[in-house]
Image (spheres, rainbow, N blue to C red):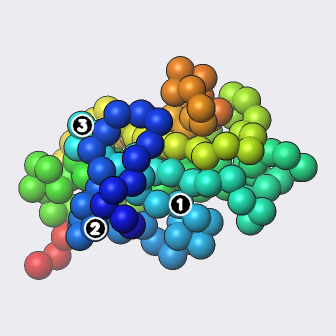
Amino acid sequence: MDESVTSPEEGTPLPADHPLHLPPYARAMGMEIDRIEDGVPVIGMDYTERAVGRPGYLHGGAIGGMLEMAAFTALRAELDRTGAAMRIKPVNISIEYLRGGVDHRTYAMGRVTRAGRRVANVRVEAWQADRDKPVASCWMNFLLAPKAE
């Protein structure tokens, strides 16, 4: 990603050598870490043919996948910040689709609400032109286990 990327919201551009990396699925869907806000990655995805569901709208699976990637990156950033070397395993996800995603760039950002010794909970919102009008949100729960050294 180019270090000079700008976006509609204020934020810190992501350095090209940042340790957070998205998996192949996310990259294939066109997702990228758009920027970092308060230490949390913001995922961005352009509206493209590969993410279209019904004509003119994003597919719900593309939105759900984006929410999941935002949850993983938010939790990984929090664990890295605290120095906790943990393996993370998703337990469940509950998605609320709030409005149709249209022909605009979509963003998603997670907030870790709890990261204990065994369980973590992350809240994620996805939006397009107006952050105050989310297209979807979710809760995602994870099991945490220490990494074997």
Q: Which residue appears at 57% of the width and 26% of the height? A: 130
The residue mark sitting in front, 2 or 3, is 2
- Image quarter of the N terminus: bottom left
Residue, disc 2:
16
Under mark 1, the amino acid is: Met
Judged by depth in the image, the label closer to the viewer, 1 or 2, is 2
Q: Please, is residue 1 above or below residue 47 in the view?
A: below
**Left of 17 or right of it: where is 48?**
right
Residue 74, horizontal then vertical, whole percent:
34, 48
Mark before the other along the chain sequence, 1 or 3: 1
Is 14 on the left or on the right of 123, as rendered?
left
Q: Around disc 2, counting alpha carbons within 10 Å, would you say few (fewer than 14), some (14 to 19), or many (20 or more)? A: few
Q: Could you tell me how far apart the alpha carbons at marks 2 and 3 are, in whole angstroms?
A: 18 Å
**Percent position of residue 54, x then y:** 88, 49
Density class for disc 1 (Cα within 10 Å; few <14, some 14-19, many ≥20) is many
Q: What residue did someone put label 3 on? A: 38
- Numbered circle sitting on residue 31: 1
Residue 74 or residue 89, whichever sits in front: 74
- State whether residue 127 is above or below residue 80: above
Residue 15 % position (x, y): 25, 61
Side of 25 where 117 appears, left or right: left
Q: How many marks can you see?
A: 3
| Rendered residue at 59%/72% (across/down) | 28
| Residue toward you, 126 or 96 | 126
Question: Considering the numbered disc 2 on the image, is that residue within a helix, a strand or a loop?
Answer: loop
Q: Amino acid at mark 3?
A: Asp
Sequence order check, earlier mark of 1 and 2: 2
Secondary structure under the numbered disc 3 in the rendered image? loop
The residue lying at 69 percent from left, 34 percent from top is 97
